[in-house]
Structures are given as structure tokens and as C-alpha cells.
Image (cartoon, rainbow, N blue to C red):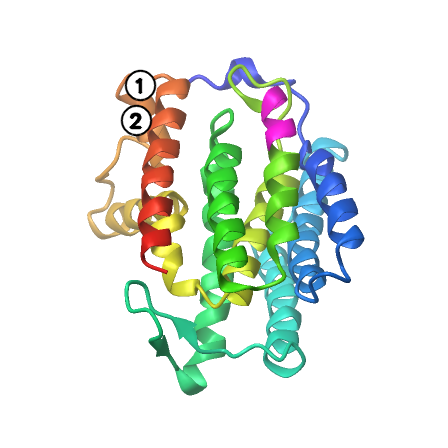
Amino acid sequence: PSHQKKAGTPTMGGVMFLAAFTAVSLLFRKEGAEVVPVLFLTLGFGLIGFLDDYLKVVLHRSDGLYPKQKMALQAVITAVFLRYLARFSGISLRMRIPFLPGKELDAGIFTIPFLAFVILGTVNGVNFTDGLDGLAASVTILNAVFFSVASIGLGNGVSPSALAVIGSLLGFLVFNVFPARVFMGDTGSLALGGFVSGMACFLRLPLFLPLVGFIYMMEILSVILQVSFFKLTKGKRIFKMTPIHHHFELMGWSETQIVTVFATITAILCLIALMGL
């Protein structure tokens, strides 16, 4: 797809909604003790994205952060968050099982590695999703709606975080829908990944992420499958281009069509996930 015409559009717009999200989270930090750790994970990943964007946009280093640097920083943020969750949060690490109310999965010694995998997978999935105007924002608003309803229903105090994300992203979407006047950049997409995975951990809903975060999962899986298949077959491809939203673009879908379909799929799956609570 010719995204050349988008060159010159301001990026790092993630700073706009992160400022609003941070302000609301700090206002409500007394109401829900979980608000601050979710804010930590969101801002932690947002800061990694900000460094990446800063190197690309301001210092004109085309690669931004090197992959190893990015992974190391992501691992540190994830480790600090999971240590807090396990040691100090007072929240059980048993995970709610979809469609089996009252049933929980205790993964024992595998819990922390599994949650680390979930956090890093989600963060990078959201990052891959952010490739079309309004796509990552639309899908994440629907995720945030799911988490706010789940939080209120489960009596967990983390709903202000979700409501803050809904509000700040709706405001951002005004400038980010096609044709976008501002992009969220890695600052925004990595932060949103932190938010989604943080909410899932605190509400003990990581097993619901394949449903509500289906689009993120498809985006990252399409890249993994494409790269693996390309290497195995010495140059053959499964998709025309990955992440998968580009495959649909090359099939002739417009950006608006893809965003509408992906958001609709997410909305339906979020409703199914709510029934699964």
C-alpha cells in the first residue's frame, strides 16, 4: 500500500491521550489501589515507545531503538509490574476461566512466565495493529469498554483507568480517523498494550484476551507465520503483506472498511466475552 502520502503527518500523538489518562488515574488513585500499577505499566511501555519515536522523529535514526534494547526495556517493565502483582497487590494470581463462572485456573509456577508472555505478546500485538488510521484506537476503545464493564461487575476498583482510556481515546480518535491528522506512534501503541495487559492481569482475565484482543493476536500471529513460512520455503508467502491489515489493503479494501470490520469483530467478541464472565 502506498503510505508515502502519510509522510509528514505528526506522530507521537500518544502523548495527548497519555496525559489525560495519567491525570484521571492520579485523581482516582484513592478509589482503586489497582489504578496506579496499571498506570505504571501503561506509562512504562509508553516511555519505551516515546524513546523509540524520539530517536526516529527528532534524531532521525531510522531504526529507533534496536530490537534488543526494546526487548530488554520491555522485560524490565514487565518484571517490575509482575513482582508487584505477585508480592504486594494482594490479588490472587488464579485466572478466571471463560464461560465457567466460579472456576479458576491455578497455573502454579507457570503463572508468572505465562503472564509475562501475555503482557509482551499483547503489547507487541497492539503495536502491530497500529498501522491504519484509527485502527488501534478503535479496537482498544472497545477493549476498554469491556474492561470497564467487567471491573464494575466484578467489584474491582480499576474501572477509572478503563473509563479514562475510553474518554481520552475518543478525543484522540477525532484527529486519528481517516485521513489521520496525527498518529499515536509507538508512544501510544505500546502504552495501550500496557493498559490492556495490565487490566487483564488485575481483573484476572488473561484467558479472555484471545477473545477481546483477537485482532491484536491476529496481527502478531500473521507476522510470525509469514516470517516462519518465508524462511521455511525460502521465499514463499502466506499473506500478500503483514501485519494482516496490509493483506486486506492489497486485496483492495479501503482503510475505513478494514477499521470498520476489525472494530465490529472486536465489539462482537467483547460482548461474547462479557457473557463468558
Q: Amino acid at mark 2?
A: Phe
Residue 228, position as x, y percentages in the image: 29, 52
Q: How many marks?
A: 2
Residue 198, position as x, y percentages in the image: 57, 60
Residue receiving disc 1: 253
Type of secondary structure dominating the magenta stretch: helix
The answer to whether residue 170 is visible is yes
> Dots 2 and 1: beta carbons under 8 Å?
yes
Residue 160, position as x, y percentages in the image: 65, 51
Stretch in magenta: 170-175
Residue receiving disc 2: 248
The answer to whether residue 63 is visible is no
Give left or right: position of 194 versus 145: right
Give left or right: position of 40 versus 104: right
Q: Image point 59% across, 39% down: which residue?
A: 166
Give left or right: position of 206 versus 172: left
Pointer 2 or 1: first along the chain: 2
Query: For residue 247, what is the image quadrant?
Result: top left
